[in-house]
Amino acid sequence: MPKRLIWLTVRIAAGIAIVVVPFGYAVTGVQADVLIGAGCGLAIGVGVGLRGGSAGGPWTGVLAGSIIGISAALIAGAVPLDGWGLLILPILALAVGLIDGFSGSSLSGYRDMVRETFILSVLFALGLLPATMALGRTSVIILVVSLMPIICVPAVALVAGMLSRRREGWRDARPPWLLLVGAVVLFVVGTLVMADELGIGGVSQIGVILINVLFTSLLLLALPAAAFLLGRTAITWLQPRLRVYSHLAQYLRVMWVPIGGFAVGYLTIIVLFSGFYGMLGHFRPGAFAAADAGASAGIADWFSFAFFTALGQDFTTVAPVSVSARVLVGAHLILSAGWALVLFAAVMSSIGPKLDRIARRHAADGD
């Protein structure tokens, strides 16, 4: 694999992991649920990003992977551990909706929809492997779990195609008969499985059949349809608003050095005054009051006090008491504010022409 693709994969995977893994641990304490969210998000996000190429790949991959990973972690945390297979249909439909909603999407027929759904189902199956292997499942169970997203392809592709059929550029008026047969077979099998799972007693045979058909329709039709529409609507709404960040990146590249210079100067002031505070506290023991009576402040306390003082915030552990301590704090505040104002004026005067050129270029491009 070329170094460029390796670097692109690492960037996409890191972006998804930073978003999905902490969110997974925040919504559920089950390790397997976090692995499901992270695995599915990474597999689909990296696959989408690499297929998108270097131009729009990184951000599209991170965005799609983060949405898929967060959704998978939420659903996996909401259902019992032995029932997280219920997330396959909605997550797969959500992924297809995201792809269909991206600008420049080439999905214009049922065949395109089947192909894209199949590719995403393979990525989805790969994303489920870490969780199933971590649970210590047998090879047969791992194989079944890996095949489940692929088995669901006809239902998801049919629902997605029907919901996209009326849009401009859609070629096929009717779905292929093989797709219909696959969806019908999946529906019949799902009805039989649902009948075995429910086992409702005290209801007539016709009533049981109707209940099974209702649950199967909800699982195989309504749920994927809602997930597909949610994914397509979300990405259609987000895309034009996320373009602002591509413009912001150009401004940040111009301002990167001045921002670094400001941070270095600000940190220097904080370090300098932390030493002043420590020296004053050493020679004037009553100049500062500590929250813990009898405790002596160390360098970490003085540095934290100087940091919060520079931000104009109170630091609860240490407080100035004597006149000399308050004068020193006032000088620190004046110097910090003056540094921010002076450097801001200097930076804007030096980089102003560059920012104006970027703004004129965006206006000329019609963004």
Image (spheres, rainbow, N blue to C red):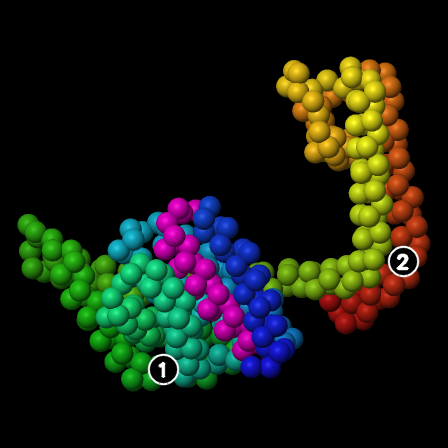
Q: Alpha-carbon distance for marks 2 and 1?
A: 57 Å
- Magenta span of residues: 27-53
* Residue beneath the point at 28% across and 72% down: 143
* Residue beneath the point at 67% across and 24% down: 317
Position of the N terminus by quadrant: bottom right
Q: Is residue 18 above or below residue 326?
A: below
Q: Is residue 57 visible?
A: no
Residue 133 found in image quarter: bottom left
The numbered dot on residue 352 is 2
* Residue beneath the point at 19% across and 71% down: 188
Q: Horizontally, is 181 left or right of 289 in the view?
A: left
Task: Name the secondary structure under disc 2.
Answer: helix
Magenta highlight on residue 175: no
User: Can you tell which of label 2 and label 1 is closer to the viewer?
Assistant: 2
Query: The disc labelled 1 sits on which kind of residue?
Result: Arg
Where's residue 293, x and y in %?
Answer: 65, 15
The numbered dot on residue 142 is none
Label 1 sits on residue: 174
Where's residue 53, x and y in %?
Answer: 60, 78
